[in-house]
Amino acid sequence: MAVGTFTAIPVYADTDVSVDGDAVTGVIDGETAEDESTTDTGGSGFRSSVDVKRFLGTVSYKEYSEKYQDTPAASESIFINAVDYDPELTTAKVEVKNDYEGMEGESLLMPSEGKTTWKFTVPKTGRYAIRITYYPEPGTFTTIERMIYIDDLLPFTESRYYYFPRSWEYQLDADGEFDKDINGNDIRPIREEAPEWQTYFLRDWLGFTMDPFEYYLTEGEHTITFEATREPMVLSTIELYGYEDPISYEEYISNLKAQGVTEIKTLDEPIKFQAEKPYAVSNASTYPTNDRTSALTEPQDPAVMKYNLVNDGTINQWIKYKVTVPEAGLYNIVVRFRQNTYIGMFSTRRLYVNGEIPFEEANRLRFHFSPDWQVTPLHDGNQNFLIYLEKGENELMLEPVLGDMEEYVYRVEQMLDDLNGAYQQIIQLTGPSPDTYRDYGFGRLVPEALVTIGNCADDLYEIYEELKVVTGDEGDLVKTLDTAAKLFEKIARDEYEIAPNLITYKNYIIMLSNWLYSTLNQPIKIDYYVVQGTEDELPTAVASFLDAAWFEVRAFVMSFFMDYTTIGYKDDVEYDPNMTVESWITDAVTGRDNALIQRYLIDNYFTPESGISVTIKVITAGIQEAILAGIGPDVANMDTTNTITWGLRNAVESLNDKEGFNEVTTWFPEAALVPLTMYDKTYGLPETMTYALMFYRSDIFADLNLDVPETWEELYEIIPTLQNSNYQIAIPIGLDGYKMFLYQNGSELYRDNGLRINVDSNEALDAFEDFTDMFTKYKSPIVTDITRFRTGENPIMVQNDGITAYNTLMGFYELRGLWEMAPLLGVRQEDGSINHTSPVTVNALVIPRGATNPDATWEYLKWRTCEDTQIRQNKENLAINANPTAKLATSNKAALLKLAWTDYEYAAIKAQVEQLVGIPDYPGCYIVTQYVNSAFQVVYGDSSDAATEMLNRVLYINKELSRKRREFHMDYYDLDSTRDGTWQLIESDRGLNYINYGK
Amino acid sequence: VANSKVLKADKVPVSSNEPGSGKKLTKTSYTLKMMKRTWGGYVMILPFTVCFIAFTMIPVILSILLSFTDFNMLEWPSWRGFDNYIRLFLEDDLFMTAFQNTIIFAVATGPASFIISFILAWFINELSPKARSFVTFIFYAPSISGGAYLIWQLVFKEDIYGYANGWLMSLGLISEPIAFFKDVNYIVPLCIMIQLWSSLGTGFLANIAGLQGVDRSLYEAGSIDGIKNRWQEAWYITLPQMKDILLFGAVLAITGAFGFGGVVDALCGNPSTDYVAWTLSHHLGEYMGQRFEFGYASAISIVLFFLMAGMNIVVQKLLEKVGQ
């Protein structure tokens, strides 16, 4: 889709209207929406409020399925060959493939955008589940996403999000072992995409519903449409079938016995396979991990790190194993595992044997909580199961599911909608901070809210009691429900308790929501599986005291000989010993994870190509001291202020003379290099960059019938409406916020190439007034918090670090589809375009003085910031970020735009990245931050005149700028002349005169 | 065996100081001789001495030297004579603010914290042992948990979610939330209050220990000698008995008060609005960490050092008056 244009609007079904009638109105609405959006000159790709409302109006699958529960499941299946699509209704540029990747016959490649539609005839009215055979076309790490329409309508909300798993395998060496680094530690294996044809039934991607989704179809002609949201896929067939529960375990056994299958009593040699070496995984961030808590975990070593278990649990993300057995029969499959995270509860897995769920209970295999390692056969809490395996190779697939928790989670999920609705109703009367002593008359004004809360309390008590029985324990997860229920009961009984407890009430909603999403992770650490006979003895779970003690003693002794700061390189990588680079990573939070990712990328992509080896060290501080002592790194991360200060003092190398420098600079937005450049010398390359983006809650805007503002002016217009409903606007405070207004006003922070400050110019003073008005006049809060966007108190927010905010918001599952990202609010220009300019700050990679091998270092620097590396790093980061849609804040423009954005997101990011401004960090820049922040706080606190407060501070700022420039032996304004305004320039004693320097 | 050792030890002074032994020892050679004999003791203090010289004395001397130079940690320092000190006292407006604030904070928190902690200790010492340990714990807790003062951030939060703002608004005293830690009118009093709260613990604990160590029989003797009331008892017996502990507490209070700054950083941000709570330790940190002017920073630290040393002497003199 081209940027800025509007795709055909998805039309959402309304349960109350007949399909035909609604389709007609839908189309009319769709056209209206399209007209509106084309008049949108900003081209930032907002979703229209009509569209959002229609999305909000869609029913959930639960309501949908309840409505049609009396309709029988279909008795006949309908097969559709993917290649029989309807060319007239299809907008995607599809491609027919012949005998593609081992699939006989024709299949259809559907690209990452556009719709593909098929026509089919339903023989008999009924409920149809849908099963597709697809091939995940290799691409990025991002999941494949589709929306599925029936007759051009979304029958229920969940039909908007279908995620199709990919398939990955670990690359092991010739002996089937993990690669080792020079210290003998295992290295995190490369995961190669190993796409396979898969049959997959359409289901709830979140996992709240375990069974396939069933679509209600009437007899006659229908269409089914796949609309691509992310990533291409190849489709072979679509099958619509009637879903039936699998047979019970009893039936399974008796069926098999009837066929003459027998139990395997004993095996000479138990067949053991290690969990950390699966055949394939669906989630690229399922990594093998290391356990040192038990001497029995296999393989184990007291000195070096061995990957010896797999720790997974994200719902719907499967792991596959292949196991070969000598003869067909019923086997006992035993697991050594530890489930110590999900306290007092059990984790659940669904088992597929050779692609089929063998019996109903296999949907709910339990792994109970215990602080210790356990060894158990597969069971569901009531009985142990034997599994039939064919002679030869069998495929076992385990998939985390909700299992017996499904019902409770579903009930709490429904409840949350009601509780949130009640909260919204209440704060529309009171605002987020109610007056405790006022009688709001809730009972009279919002009686239904009180009833809702009361019902929720009863429900929660019920769920709490039932869960206690199911889990046999009162873990903290279950206890949460009881705590919340008590508060809701109190509020519902006495309306005067609402005002004093409103904030707690809101926190409890968040707590319940967190509870809900925590159940979507079913963590288990699995060491190995053993296939054995029914009479064979179980392996030992917990090491004896002596074994454990001996292991610990050896591990302690070895800890004196191991180097933990250096992340060693792979032992079999060839490199030139004269070409080594030492890179220091300082990030305290993600330091080690980041270092592992760098290590992985270097070993696999950099060293083999360039012959340059790179040592990585994780440090917390002390770069400056190290450089002074002459033992500094060759590459380090640094902020812009230090880069410039150190560069001017020759402690950081200028990169301008490096080979290919001019080409490298074109990789980044021009603005990103400005803070790293001082007088035509660039001292670093930007690795990540930060800039502002705007976020808004589309549901609240649709609810209030407001258009989303694109300029500050438009925002001012809607502020009264927002405030009437007690909503607030969140924007950055202090210098960060001021810079946005300043540069959008066409002004600048410095004058005369940094010789003096420019905040005393008329435009700058106007900008400062506009900015402080946001807080004094329009009452924006000076403390903001992203959770207030989540609860809806701040339905619109500007975040300085836009990408981080985006990543955080993507993690709020309940908000999916209810918010959008847009460029920063701007100022409309005379030609009608909007100036969305945002200041950009970068994190730089620099070469400190005394780098041993400048050329090799430069090669490494180029490689590290290039497009391919940045995209790969983004993929790898997903392993740290549990969130599969998280993005790296890369400053490589091409890489940034190639990340898997949706069309709306892409439009917003592209618009913003094209309007960035970099502000040079002139010597003495710290003083500007200090005084401007003070001016802001004083204006806010004392409501004094903005211009006066700013002007009062200009002299102090100029004085420090002059003083600092003199220290750097640059030209500067004489201090006395700054007072009387004559601006006498004192020339530099080292010939560093920059007043006439071109920009 | 034991006997022979004793004899040997006895012999030492006798032989060296014996008049008429023929050799008159000078002080130096006597000292050297004694050192040779007691070498074991010197070996034992050696590790500490080496560390003390390497990590305390040399840096102090170096920083005195550096305060006369211009040093940015990246280039070799150059000699500047008294430039740094001249600039400090004559040109640097911010230094004067810092100096004033430091004195204000030091006076408000140092002596106050010292006196309050003594009085509290004195009162609490009268409680039964169980009650005493409980109350001691209550007072000492803020000091053990280093960042406990951050709780005040929640109490005085800038928006309606802060407790103080919430209460004041619900009482109808204010209509808009006050940004307590950002508003120049509130920063200093709040910081003084919080510093007092968090610094009481250590001095208080020392005082309790001191009070426990006072010999009870002295009170008996005192009452026989004509002590009339508890005040006299405190002034003539308790306090003189506790002099060392008092000095210890005073030194702690003074260093704490002059090094004041961490609380401001954590609660009000660095720098505080309009530098209203800017102290010498902020000034020092700013020039070292932010501006890379180590020569100038050293000069500041020298001034701070003399300020503290001077204050310690004054306190010592004052304490000598106790009980007179």
Image (cartoon, grey):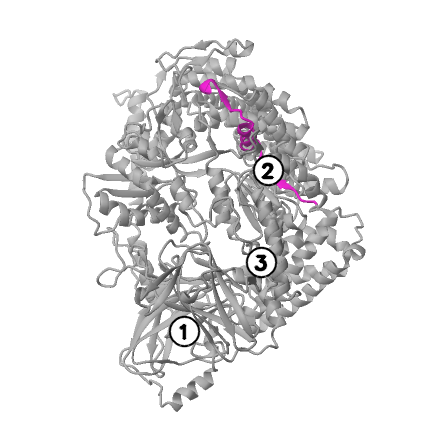
Task: Provide residue A48's location: percent of width, then percent of height.
Answer: 59, 48
The quarter of the picture where residue A398 lies is bottom left
> Viewer-proximal residue, A196 or A359?
A196
Crowd class of label 2 (few under 14; some 14 to 19; many from 20; radius 10 Å): many
Subunit that carries the residue with mark 3: A
Give the residues drawn in magenta, as a range: A726-755
Q: CA distance from mark 2 to mark 3?
A: 68 Å
Which label lies toward us, 2 or 1? 1
**Residue beneath the point at 68% across and 52% down:** A424
Q: Residue B200: which disc?
A: 2
The quarter of the picture where residue A474 lies is bottom right
For badge 3, the amino acid type reads Val
For badge 1, the amino acid type reads Tyr
Q: Is residue A733 a member of the stretch shown in magenta?
A: yes
Under circle 2, the secondary element is helix
Under circle 1, the secondary element is strand
